[in-house]
Each structure stands twice: as C-alpha cells, then as structure tokens.
Amino acid sequence: MDIIAVTDRKRCARPILEQARLICSAGADMIVMREKDLPYAESLDLAGSLAEICGGFGTGFCVDGDPRIAEELGIEAVWMPFRSVPDEIPAAPRTIVSVHSYDEGIKASEMGAYAVVYGNVFETTCKPGKAAMGLGTVARLASELEIPVWAIGGIGPGNIRAVSGSGASGACLMSGLMAAEDPERIVSECRKACQHPEPIQYS
C-alpha cells in the first residue's frame, strides 16, 4: 500500500522543504502539496521546490487544487475536490479526486479520475470536531472500482493496519508525517503494520 504525505507547513516539525526531503528519504511514495492559503506565485515557487526534491528521490508529487500549477511545471498529478472537477476529467495531468461518499467515488471514477481519496476515515486534529467516517465506504469502493482508492484522515502506525485491510491502495498522512521528528520511523512502522492487514467488511 502506498504511503502518501500531504503537506501542512504550519504543522511541520522543521522547515517544509527539509521535512519533505526527510519524508522522501524515508521512502514515502508520494508527496501532495496542499497549502491552500498561499498566493499563486508562492504556491508555484513552493511546488517547484518540492517537485525538485521529490524528483531527486524518485518520489511521486502532486499539487492540490490548482491545475494551472501542474500544467506550468509539468507536474504529473493534481488533487481536486469532487465539487470542483469538470464533467469529463482530462487525461493529463492525472486527477486525484477527494470524495466524501460512495456515490461521489463512483461518479468520479466514471468521469475519468486517476484515483479517489475518501475521508476522513478516523478522527483527526486537522478537522477537529468532525466525526470519523470509518472504512466501510473505502472497502466498498476498493472492491468495485478499477482505479486506486486512498484513505485520509487521522491515519498513523497505530491504525494503518485496518486501512490496509480495507483494500485501500494508499494511505494519506498529513500531521502524522508533517509533525514527525523522525519521518523514517513513521514510514517504517506503517510499512511493517501493513504486512499483516486487518480485513475490513462493509455493509
């Protein structure tokens, strides 16, 4: 299962580029730049720096929310909320769609999404007060869709075994990796936990 780091420079244990370099070195499969409050020019600059770091390690890179950045820098993937995607998703850049229901996941796949991300599956400090949605829908989508299904929200070494057991092909960690003093340990523990997945059923 892929380990995907989602950035949050305000929660970083150290400057974001340094943290990203450690996360890539630790063996994460992808970094998603998700810094929604940055002006376009600053987002473009940060995306370029992160893309260079990821490229040096062979780590996948994705930008959140603004296809213009992906197009301008030649980035392979863009992450967008379901409500913002066009009726027919273009083949490039690859579009990863965040969804909050089974129906949205099915529709995103039909529209041409490269992957769908469902959450928040567990309670998370990134969205305080928002109830966990669980892994049932992740399991259902993973069993029915041919595209990758990723889970997000409150995921870490202590519960990623259940995420793996749901059939998800990716687990997205934000504060779990951004705030980590030792990203290598977090990635290693997640990999080890996924070696023995805990099967999740859906109704």
Image (cartoon, rainbow, N blue to C red):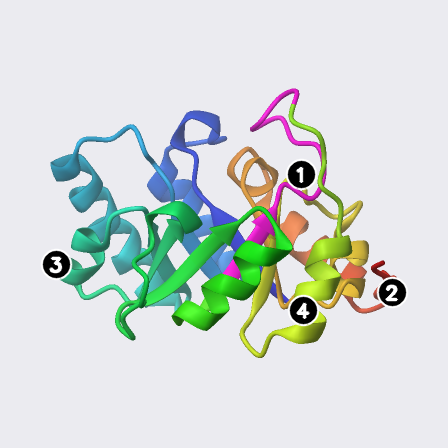
**Of the pair 123 and 187, the residue shown nearer to us:** 123
Q: CA distance from mark 1 to mark 4?
A: 19 Å
Q: Earlier in the sequence, mark 1 or mark 2?
A: 1
Majority secondary structure of magenta residues: loop
Q: Position of residue 47 (x, y in %)?
A: 25, 49
Res. 72 mark: 3
Quadrant of the snapshot with the C terminus: bottom right
Chain part drawn in magenta: 116-129
Task: Give the left or right position of residue 151, taking residue 32 as reference.
Answer: right
| Mark 4 vs mark 2: in front | 4
Which residue is under mark 4? 142
Q: Evaluate if marks 3 and 4 touch, with contact meaning CB atoms under 8 Å apart.
A: no
Q: Earlier in the sequence, mark 4 or mark 2?
A: 4
Q: Residue at x 47, y 46 (%)?
A: 6
Asked if residue 113 can be seen in this view, the reply is no
Say which amino acid is labelled 2.
Pro
